[in-house]
Image: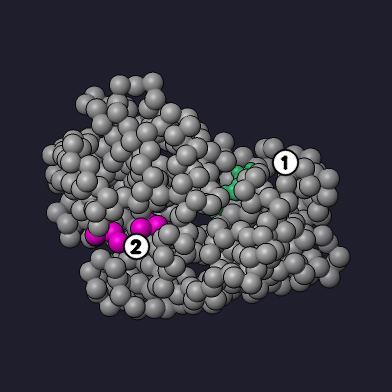
Amino acid sequence: MKCKITNYKLKPFMSFGKMPIANGFLSKKNFKNEFFYKLEVGFSKKLSLFQINNHPKPSQMFNKNYPFFSGSSKGMINHFRKFSKWIKKNYGRKLNNLVEIGSNDGTFLKNFQKDKTNVVGFEPSKNVADFAVKKGIKTINKFFTFNNVKRLKKLKNQIDIICAANVICHVPNLKSLIKGMDFLLNENGLFIFEEPYLGSMYKKVSYDQIYDEHIFIFSVSSVKKIFNLFGFYLIDVIPQKTHGGSMRYVISRNNKVKKSVKKYLSIEKKSNVDNFKGCKKFKLNCEKSKKDLVSKIKKLKKQNKKIAGYAATSKSTTILNYCNLGCESIDYICDTTKEKIGKFSPKKHIPIKSMNYFYNNLPDVAFLFAWNHKKEIFKKEKKFQKKGQWIAHVKL
Ligand code: TYD
């Protein structure tokens, strides 16, 4: 098992078994062609980097049928509005050109539409890219690789800020991405990105963050080490509540590093987020979490409780397949995304239903797969809450 950036040997320490594509919600006619791979995780001691091995090709995941729309959550719309405000407040004075990597349906870039800033998004999944273009957001329907970026000669060293949210952990060839970023950014340019945070995943035992799209689960230690290899510095980090705990990273060519970086490096050292001990503990915690969840569901089924899944998230694919829970336990999963409704969950083939179906067939128990959107969901599901019970594999 080798790290894609440096060829340092990695130590695999855990397997989640045979997995389907996490966002591969499928129709009955495609059951027989379903793609599987072995989901294993390893840790690069040199880079303090947590990563999966043997991921499917990016084009197998991000294509014309990608069913994830950033705008499907009000919470995320709000978050992206705040993120853009934060950028304007802190770095807005000379913000002429901004690029977003993985711009999805344009939810983030939309916040710059009224400004003088020129914005352009890179988005490889055609359906979501088309959606953004329809909203008037300039979008290049390509992966952000050095080969694709270097063709944009006019933009060389012209970009003030490159942003990304929940995207960089999806990119297997970080070297090509960083070279592309280096090509575009001007001398004082910044790369600002946020990703699910390894420290939060360890704390919450939210192993469902691990799936084909999330090749890396970053920490402050790993991001610092990776970018130092390419002559960039991690100058600031800001924790975020999104996705059950994320971190925003600010990368620059100058080394005026803020105190926050030192603070988090020290926290990570103390809590073994920067070393292999943390992995070993996490593995044991996952095994315990699986045992507890399976016995909780068994108990509920013995009491004849009807259980439905709430939100057909990519994360739910890891939970259901790692814990071997299928239609015998979960009757259906409701979701708001029209691209998922009427399809079936990857590998376990649990039917995905509309929200109307949920309201007409209220279960006794709802398994909150979108636990990271708990606040938003609990607020709107008061009726279910009166009678029903929420459960999750993490503490709610
Ligand atoms: P999210 O946790 O953002 O995604 P993922 O694990 O896939 O990265 O959840 C997005 C999914 O949750 C998407 O299919 C829409 C669904 N969803 C609902 O069905 N209802 C809701 O209220 C919310 C917030 C999300």
Instruction: Where is residue 227? Give x, y as percent.
Output: 22, 56
For ligand 1, tell me if the residue under mark 1 lies within 8 Å: no
Dot 1 lies on which element? loop
Relative to 232, is 108 on the left or the right? right
Please state which amino acid type lies under the numbered disc 1: Glu
Please state which amino acid type lies under the numbered disc 2: Pro
Q: Which residue is mark 2?
A: 172
Residue at the image position 53 percent from the left and 64 percent from the top: 21
Is residue 210 visible to us here?
A: no
In front of the other: 303 or 85: 85
Residue 143, compared with residue 270, is above or below; it is: above
* Mark 2 or 1, nearer chain start: 2
Segment tinted magenta in the rendering = 169-175
Residue 58, compared with residue 246, is above or below; it is: below
Is residue 70 visible to us here?
A: yes
Q: Which residue is mark 1?
A: 381
Instruction: Where is residue 215? Give x, y as percent.
Output: 40, 63
Relative to 122, is 161 on the left or the right? left
In front of the other: 201 or 277: 201
Relative to 359, is 258 on the left or the right? left
Q: Is residue 62 magenta?
A: no
Residue at the image position 50 percent from the left and 45 percent from the top: 127
Q: What is the total number of numbered labels drawn onto the structure image?
A: 2
Q: Residue furthest right?
A: 304
